Image (spheres, grey):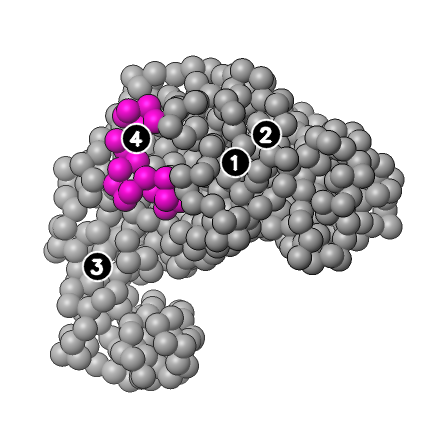
Amino acid sequence: MQAAQYISSKVYNLSAKEEFVNSAKSGKILARKCTKCGYLHLVTTYFCQNCGNKGFENVLIEGKGTIVTYTIITVPPAGYEKYTPYAWVVIKLDGVDLQISGFMQNITSPSDLPLGAKTKVAGYDERGILIEKL
Amino acid sequence: MEKVCVIGAGSTKYGKLQDSITDIAVQASVEAIENAGIEPKEIQAGYISNVFGIADKQVHLGPVIMSNLGISEVPSLSIESACGSGSVSFREAYANVAAGFYDAVLATGVEKVTHTGTEWTTTYFSYCSDFFYEGGAGASFPGLFASMARAYLAEFKATEEDLAMVAVKNHDNGFANPKAHLRKRITVDDVMKSAVVASPLKLYDCCPFSDGASAVILCSEKFAKEHTKNYIQVIGSGRGGSPAALQGREHITTIPSTKIAAQAAYKMAGVTPKDIDFAEVHDCFTIAELVDTEDLGFFEKGKAVDAVRQGMTKLNGAISINPSGGLKSKGHPIGATGIGQVVEVFDQLTGKAGERTVKDAKIGLTHNFGATGASCAVHIFKSV
């Protein structure tokens, strides 16, 4: 975890999820960094999982990372029929100790997406957090 | 703490059932009461596990079940912890008897969803995930476990055929279980040729959506001795939690809550994984059984796949895993599953498991979790 990876740090007035969504729309992941131990959490966390501290500072992280694992869904939940098949992926963000998962269109075969492939956060809409290949 | 025993067990068949959610819950409860040889009036509390009562137009199931049993005055509650509801409810029943609040209680688990169809169940089950990050980004439950599977296959050089062998083994066991939902033998080829649900998982890697109800009577040792010689003792009870979303886990191929719950249960029971003769584990998908049997300490990390290849987990292998057929073949009525596992252990340790009997078994373990293992309970039982 290196401070240099954070491209800005400020407190917003919106709810945590609204802030997160707005950040994702600009390709960034809004996270919370513990002011005591530096442990990183997603914005929906209120006490540090590592040390129990309540103090956080918001940090914006560049939404680029590598594929940790994924699935290609062919039997979707309601609302996703018109997007099927699609991938749901877990990525590890570059340079920080944080993973994020999301929706990925245009993946129909495992050959389309090797583990370790480079990806980026590309937005947020009715499909959730959108991830694309870099 | 009081020693806690299980003195009666009952279960409906698992599968597509016609009767209502209330009817099947009562049928299993009546069987457990009669099997225990007690009067309903001796029951002092009811613990009801269920997730989607709303699908069959009945929530607040406890008082309805109690009323049908002629004990409307008895307190009850409903417990929801996704697919782990049954074991979590069993734990609360156990804790209250152990604490001396009650001498005898009923724990009934029930689910009735097959009439809703695949789209409804796929969608509503996804609400058991950390929805903002998972279900709300298109992840189905097969998809979440498929993600664990892809990571496992890559990390431990396992194959989709290896996963298929878990399904084949559990169908072999379930074939001998008259109450199993999918009571048919299958081959690796059948699994490999079945439709892809969420790659790399195929239809036959997935447990079915099932209807069903299971019930057990828990009581103090004193109460058990006064009523029957046909009982088993709970010697270990453990619970644990995990990050709700997969993205929050350091390792995708292990389930932290299983390890935490198992360690607590082994410690309380004073046993080690080597002492366990058989286990009913949460095989909602083939990959889950591999992960579970490693997290429970039966095999080292990454070695469960070798154990399956060598047949070590077959009935009367080195350790019999899921002699009932597991969730995969016996079925997965999600609110009932954790109680159904206890029914299997009761039947095994009291000599009522018929063709699927684990020979000379003295100690059995149940392992049941909610969602991708965000919540978990492990229990250990011994024959008396």
Viewer can see residue B121: no
Name the spot of residue B148 as percent of width and height, x first. 30, 44
Amino acid bearing label 3: Lys
Task: State the CA–CA distance, disc 1 to disc 4.
Answer: 19 Å
Name the spot of residue A1 as percent of width and height, x first. 19, 73
Helix or strand or loop: what does disc 4 sit on?
helix
Q: Let me know if marks 2 and 3 both belong to one chain.
A: no
Q: Is residue A68 above or below residue B23?
A: below
Task: State the CA–CA distance, disc 2 to disc 1.
Answer: 8 Å
Mark 2 burial class by Cα count in 10 Å: few <14, some 14-19, many 20+:
many
Residue B268 falls left or right of residue B6: left
Q: Is residue A28 above or below residue B319?
A: below
Residue A87, quarter of picture: top left
Task: State the CA–CA distance, disc 1 to disc 3.
Answer: 39 Å
Over which residues does the magenta segment extend? Answer: B294-312
Q: Let me know if marks 1 and 4 both belong to one chain.
A: yes
Label 2 sits on residue: B349
Label 3 sits on residue: A92
Quadrant assignment for the N terminus of chain B: bottom right
Q: Is residue B53 magenta?
A: no
Residue B302, quarter of picture: top left
Task: State the CA–CA distance, disc 2 to disc 3.
Answer: 46 Å
Label 4 sits on residue: B307
Mark 3 burial class by Cα count in 10 Å: few <14, some 14-19, many 20+:
many
